[in-house]
Image (spheres, grey):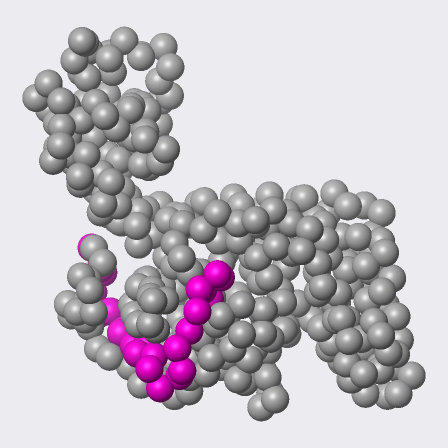
């Protein structure tokens, strides 16, 4: 059997040069099953394969996980693998699944895809881009498409509200199937649904849940006068493959501050899971006073952290099991937080770092 080092050399025709000159690259000592040492920066571990960049020449490789020795495989499979972010700082891929360049490129792609639905008005396309952006940031399928019939149903819902001069899900049959808003444009209404403010929405944040409904595949939005509506009753999308048993808003890793109203609640969702009574839930948020290198074990607080007050907590089953909570956290670029959730069999631990 050829050594791993020999295999890497044989794959030179498949290599891709990457940029040089980062002063803070984080390289790891990786050992092959034959005992050979390879110093490399790990990019991704997925599907039994490891993508890495070799230190000696800065070239990119993909190698079968089985080619490494037991200790190296254990380290790689744990997810505690360090790479670098866009400015050369070491980051843990388990804590930061996407770097800022990944996010910026994805948002550009989402916007281009929405604008390609040229048969719809510009504000409809902008609303679609906003919806799919939130879904992408939360790790959900984000190729929801505008649908002519659903847009007409949404318009009828808005017209029903206009006819009675107020928002009401009882205005007509269509209004009972929609998120409803008033006083702002269609694109801004998506941000309004995600913010989901108001005393009557505080417990469930159900409008947000409908925007993040995992199986949402088709989308309808419409307006009449000052009233607008978003059709929510669709499950035509693909079944998500979650990286964990939960997803959250704001989500794990880097999160752009402009997509979270500082005054709104945070949410964590457990699709397919269950939640105990609220009194049995232990949810804590810690302000991180320095960068976190790896996830804390169990329920242990992160080192160099400060536990924050949770001003409000509620549970909801409107679309899926959900915990909404309001931490006394500052939403500003550079602020980092660790969220720990113990809710019966439903558990979560994740880092949020706000960026511009």
Residue 45 vs residue 134, the one in the foreground: 45
Looking at the picture, does residue 290 appear above or below residue 49?
below
Q: Tell me the quarter of the image containing the C terminus.
A: bottom left
Locate residue 338: give its quadrant.
bottom left
| Residue at x-position 37% and y-position 57% | 253
Question: Is residue 169 part of the magenta span, yes or no?
Answer: no
| Residue at x-position 18% and y-position 9% | 1
Q: x, y (%) of residue 16?
A: 37, 21
Looking at the picture, does residue 210 appear above or below residue 280?
above
Q: x, y (%) of residue 175?
A: 80, 75
Looking at the picture, does residue 109 appear above or below residue 296?
above
In the picture, measured across the screen, residue 242 lies left or right of residue 170, that is left
Locate residue 214: give its quadrant.
bottom right
Residue 247 vs residue 321, the one in the foreground: 321
| Residue at x-position 48% and y-position 61% | 272
The mark tally for this picture is 0
User: In the orientation shown, which residue stands out farthest toward the right?
Assistant: 163
| Residue at x-position 40% and y-position 83% | 278
Span highlighted in magenta in the image: 269-293
Kindly tell me whether residue 336 is visible in this rendering. Answer: no
Q: x, y (%) of residue 13?
A: 36, 10
Q: x, y (%) of residue 83?
A: 27, 42
């Amino acid at each position: 059997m050829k050594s791993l080092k020999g295999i890497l050399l044989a794959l030179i025709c498949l290599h891709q040069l990457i940029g040089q000159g980062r002063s803070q690259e984080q390289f790891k000592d990786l050992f092959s099953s034959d005992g050979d040492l390879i110093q490399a920066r790990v990019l991704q571990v997925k599907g039994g394969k490891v993508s890495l960049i070799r230190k000696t020449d800065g070239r990119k490789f993909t190698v079968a996980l089985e080619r490494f020795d037991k200790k190296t495989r254990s380290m790689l499979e744990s997810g505690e693998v360090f790479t670098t972010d866009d400015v050369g700082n070491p980051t843990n891929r388990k804590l930061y699944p996407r770097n800022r360049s990944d996010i910026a490129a994805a948002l550009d792609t989402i916007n281009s895809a929405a604008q390609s639905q040229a048969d719809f008005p510009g504000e409809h396309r902008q609303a679609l881009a906003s919806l799919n952006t939130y879904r992408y940031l939360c790790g959900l399928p984000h190729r929801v498409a505008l649908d002519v019939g659903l847009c007409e149903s949404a318009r009828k819902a808005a017209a029903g509200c206009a006819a009675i001069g107020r928002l009401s899900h009882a205005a007509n049959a269509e209004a009972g199937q929609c998120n409803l808003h008033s006083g702002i444009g269609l694109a801004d209404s998506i941000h309004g649904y995600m913010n989901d403010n108001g005393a009557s929405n505080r417990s469930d944040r159900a409008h947000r849940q409908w925007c993040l409904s995992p199986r949402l595949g088709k989308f309808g939005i419409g307006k009449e006068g000052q009233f607008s509506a978003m059709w929510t009753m669709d499950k035509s999308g693909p079944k998500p493959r979650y990286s964990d048993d939960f997803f959250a808003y704001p989500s794990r890793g880097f999160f752009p501050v402009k997509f979270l109203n500082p005054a709104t609640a945070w949410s964590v969702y457990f699709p397919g899971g269950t939640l105990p009574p609220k009194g049995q839930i232990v949810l804590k948020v810690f302000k991180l006073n320095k960068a976190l290198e790896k996830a804390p074990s169990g329920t242990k607080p992160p080192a160099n952290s400060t536990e924050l007050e949770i001003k409000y907590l509620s549970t909801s089953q409107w679309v899926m099991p959900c915990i909404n909570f309001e931490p006394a956290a500052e939403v500003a670029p550079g602020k980092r937080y660790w969220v720990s959730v113990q809710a019966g069999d439903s558990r979560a631990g994740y880092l949020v770092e706000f960026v511009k």
